[in-house]
Structure formats: C-alpha cells, structure tokens
Image (spheres, rainbow, N blue to C red):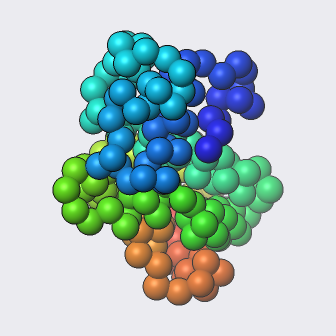
Amino acid sequence: MTSGAEADGPVTTRDRIIDGASTLTTEHGWAWVTMSKVAEHVGVSRQTVYNEIGNKSALAEAMILEELARFLDLVNHAFDEHPTEMVNAIREASRAVLVFAQDNPLLHAVVSATHGADTELLPLLTTHSESLLGVAKLVVAERVAPYELQLAEKLEPAIDMVVRLVLSHVMQPSGTPDETADDIAWIADRVLRS
C-alpha cells in the first residue's frame, strides 16, 4: 500500500501509519491489528500512533477514507478524459472503480471479515458510510456540475443514487465491470438527463 500523499508531497507519519495499518489488515485481518502492532510495523511509538490518528475506530475510518481517495482519483481521471460526454465519463468512472475494486486487497479484507472485531470495518462501507458517501457525492457533484442538466432541484438525489449504486456493485458485484458500468451509465443517462 502506498499513500495518495506521495503524489501530493512528502509522506507524513500519519500517511505511514495509515498505510501500515492497511498492510497489516490485508495480511492478518482487522481483528489482529492493534495500535502497538501498527507502531512496531511503522517504526514509531504507540503514543505517536494515538497522537496522529486517535483510537482504533479513527484508524479504521482513516484507512477507508485513504482508500476512497484512490477510488476517487479514478473517477476524476474518467471525467478528465470525457469533458463533454457526461454519460461516457460516468461509464468509464464506474468501470475503473469496479475493476480496481476486483483486485483491491484492503477492500477484500474488509468485505471478507465476518467475525469478531473484523466487523468493525464493514459498517464503514455499508450502514455507517456517511463520511465515505459524503466525500464521494461531493466529488461527483463537482464533476457533473459543468454539464448542462435540466434537473437542478433533483441533482443531489440523482448523484446520491448513482454513487450508492456504484458502491453497491463494489461491495457485491453482479456482473463484469464492463457490463455493470454500461448498466450504471444507462441509468445515469435516464436520471441525470430527465
């Protein structure tokens, strides 16, 4: 795992801690991860981990948000590649996210965690996903804004629907990334252009 901060500047202690926790989670499962083990893996004191991150719940959320940033980079790239074709941008963004999700070791560790403390991570992607959804919806809203759409008063729920649909297929795929991306683009076209 490497932090998204590397492209933006120097890697901070916080970045290293989050990356270390992600690595340990993919290798051993979240139940195995402790603040002490993260500190040892990263080469800092346990107190440094607490000072930089907070408690284990905050570490879980930081890991999920860091991984979300990688997914959103793919979304931004798709919209950059299709500046005049919103549906093509949504199709490509969905496809890229779904392909990335297929081989994402942290996502697999979170989704496959089904017992004990491991279940602490799964709600961050499902029932307690407010921060994840909020960030994703902001990015998509920003990217959709330049397109000429006639549903200003319904844009927010339309974006919410598209983001939740993609997240649902990330968590539980029902087809290939290409097939699913085509379906999501078809739905987005009907909803966002209506």
Camera-nearest residue between 119 and 99: 119
Q: Residue at x 32, y 62 (%)?
A: 113
Residue 109 in view (yes/no): yes
Q: Quadrant of the N terminus?
A: top right
Q: Residue at x 65, y 39 (%)?
A: 2
Q: Position of residue 11 (x, y in %)?
A: 66, 22
Q: How many numbered tags mark residues here? A: 0
Residue 65 in view (yes/no): no
Which residue extends farthest left?
116
Q: Position of residue 128 (x, y in %)?
A: 25, 49
The answer to whether residue 45 is above or below residue 41 is above
The answer to whether residue 40 is above or below residue 165 is above
Q: Residue at x 27, y 35 (%)?
A: 57
Q: Residue at x 72, y 21 (%)?
A: 9
The answer to whether residue 153 is above or below residue 12 is below
The answer to whether residue 47 is above or below residue 26 is above
Q: Is residue 50 left or right of residue 109?
A: left
Q: Position of residue 120 (x, y in %)?
A: 25, 49
Q: Position of residue 146 (x, y in %)?
A: 65, 47
